[in-house]
Image (spheres, coloured by chain):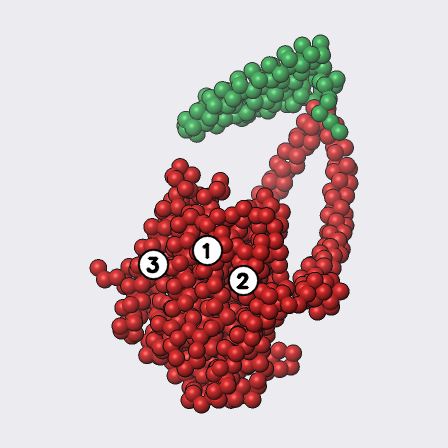
Chain colours: A green, B red
Amino acid sequence: MIPIVAYLALSAVIFSIGLYGLMTQRSGIRILMCVELMLNAANLNLVAFSSYNGDLTGQVFALFSIALAACEAAIGFAILMSIYRMKDTINLDTINILRW
Amino acid sequence: MAVENLAFLIPLLPALAFVLTFFFGKKLPSGGAIIPIAAIATSFVLSLLITLRLLANPGEVVTQSYNWFAMFNIGILVDPLAAVMLTMVTFVSLLIHIYSLGYMSHDKAQSRYFAETAFFTASMLGLILSDNILQLFVCWELVGVCSYLLIGFWFHKPSAATAAKKAFLTTRIGDVMFLAGIVILFSDLFKIFNGAVPDGVYILRFDTIFVHIPEIAAINANIFGMEVSHITLITLLFFGGAVGKSGQFPLHVWLPDAMEGPTTVSALIHAATMVTAGVYLVARTFPMFMAAPSSLMIVAYLGAFTAIFAATMGIVMNDLKRVLAYSTISQLGYMMLGLGVGATIGAEAVGISLFHLVNHAFFKALLFLCAGSVIHAVGTHDMRQLGGVAKVMPITAATMLAASLALAGIGIPGTSIGTSGFFSKDAIIENAYLFGETTGSWIPYALSIAAALLTSLYIFRLLFMTFYGKPRTDYGGHESPASMTVPLSILALLALFFGGLTSKTFNTFVSDTFVNNFVNMDISALASLGGYQLAEHAGHEPMLILWMPLIVAVAGFLIAFLVYGLKIVNMDRLVSRNNPIYKLLYNRYYQNSIFTNFFSVKVIYEGFAFAGRAIDRGFDWIVSWFADLILETGESLRQFQTGAVQNYATVVIAGVSLLVILITVVMEVL
């Protein structure tokens, strides 16, 4: 049996990679992927604890989370698509009209 | 089912007629007039039956009462006082509705007219039937609204719209006083009950109020250093309401202007019924006035003053309806005087005042309807353009003559021969004499005699200028249709004979309202509370006093006949603008100008404008300061929104990290 610490460590690593990507990347697609990574790290935590505690609730929750992530990705990519069509770029530094 | 149990239908039927006429009148012939006529006719029959029953057994007062909320009720009280008013109002209203069939037949808004008059009748009947002061006040306001709507019936005419507004605002001054009186009365009664009103006791019901009069009288208020009994305060505030509604000086200014409405409205509301609501209010709360020192004196003085004040203006007006309007004010003054002399004759005052009220309703409604008939046929109400109308409109002229004789009070003292007005007005004047004898104050009597002279003068002036002599302009004209002349004839019969037929019974019937009835009042005990000296009406007046009203009435007639009939005086010189007295009277003592130009414009309009501007600027400053503050804060805070996603992410992560650290620390500490 793999100890739970291993799952948590993996989850933390994935989360950190996602966070690092979110902070450093400029491309909208990459940022979105990083957000997905962070979400999945959280899912991993949920499933791990669920399995560890023998309680199915966490797994169900993870399923919901996956579904939501799918929706978020669909909307995010749709937005990026239309931004690309308007501006010929998805570099978020150039897309900053929502500012003071 | 006994008829007295149906009393609640008396106001409800016209109210129902209002709803039906309002919604379906347009689709029916002549504006659905048949609905209110049928409803009011039923109400009249009910009222008459109840009155006859009361006449047979004066003790059998009809009372019905339902819980409204808390310590207030909705209820019906038909005692002799209410019964005669009910019968009079339903009867006059019925006749005027029938008359309106002809009078309003050319008007496109007929259904609105009939709906509003039906609503007015319902409200007025509700006012009369009220067994508590709160319900009375509600109906009081409703009749005010109806009056506003009907004065402004031709609202496309600016003068009518202005008159309606003026009437509403002027009577409002009185209404506010009335309301203030009710509030004080309520708080006093609440105190008397120690705040614990038992179930089933309705605090503002007249019987409750009357029973507690001595306790209210014992409460004193200090106003400008004077000790004033609360009962005086309350009754004077009530009287203030009556002054507004019944067009007493100085709030009478709205009534002549109210003639902008259709003549039938003037007859119904501004002559026969609504304007008498003030008199009715004082009569209804008469035991309170009886116990209030100096209240009745003020009522008597103001009534007598209004009687002569309005009569002087009546003699110079050239507008047919305006003469009648001033006459109404003057006669209402007589009614108030009639109540005021209660200071010496006690509850009998209610009888004589109500007697004049009812007679006045008949002959004044008749005068207005005759004027309406002339206006309808000829198309003008300027008397200077009329003359000789009697030749083309014989029925109208004959009925007008009957009404004028009643108004002037022609009759032979000591017999039962005479017109209606003779019996009631003479009773008031005689009692004013008694008032003078008892209190030593002869002013009300002198004023009432002088007003009787002027009354006769202005009404016969109107008669001569309009109906006799040669036509001054080439007007067409024809006798009015039967729907108009029949009500005229009925009213003429009443104006001539009602007083003579009922003078014996009416007074005792109504005066007994407060004795052996709904509540049994000890009037003499109340009078001693109010400090009034009651006198026995022994009929010991000198013959001259009995004949005096007739003498001045005939004198008035002779002056009018000589000046306007035979034209022995050159009127052009008298009525020129250079004659200061004429100018003063014609300009209505400049009271209107003072009210409008000084009071309305200078005090209210400019004063409020000044105060408003100051307040406005103050608020403006506060609001701007606050707005600037928010704006500046926003300006500095918005720098935060950089538009770069990473910055937002940094803040979020920093926030989450901080939260985690905080939670960890807190958990450690706990």
Amino acid type shown at disc 3: Phe
Q: Which of marks 2 and 3 is nearer the N terminus?
A: 3
Residue under label 3, please give it: B44
Is the residue B186 above or below the residue B449 in the image?
above
For the residues beneath circles 2 and 3, the answer to whether they share a chain is yes
Q: How crowded is mark 1: few (under 14 residues within 10 Å), some or many (20 or more)?
A: some
Residue shown at 32%/79% (left/top)? B516
In the image, is B629 to the left or to the right of B658? right
Residue B210 placement: quadrant: bottom left
Estimate the x, y position of residue B563 in percent, counting from the top left: 62, 67
**Residue B288 in view:** no
Pinpoint the chain carrying mark 2: B
Amino acid type shown at disc 1: Pro
In the image, is B67 to the left or to the right of B254? left
Amino acid type shown at disc 2: Leu
Distance between the Cα atoms at labels 2 and 3?
Answer: 32 Å
In the image, is B637 to the left or to the right of B24? right
Is the residue A50 above or below the residue B180 in the image?
above
Viewer-proximal residue among B564 and A90: B564
Residue under label 2, please give it: B463
Residue under label 1, please give it: B394
Viewer-proximal residue among B18 and B370: B370
Distance between the Cα atoms at labels 2 and 1?
Answer: 13 Å
Q: Which of marks 2 and 1 is nearer the N terminus?
A: 1
Q: Is mark 3 on a helix, strand or loop?
A: helix
Distance between the Cα atoms at labels 3 and 1?
Answer: 30 Å
Pinpoint the chain carrying mark 3: B
Q: What element carries label 2?
A: helix
Residue shown at 35%/70% (left/top)? B79
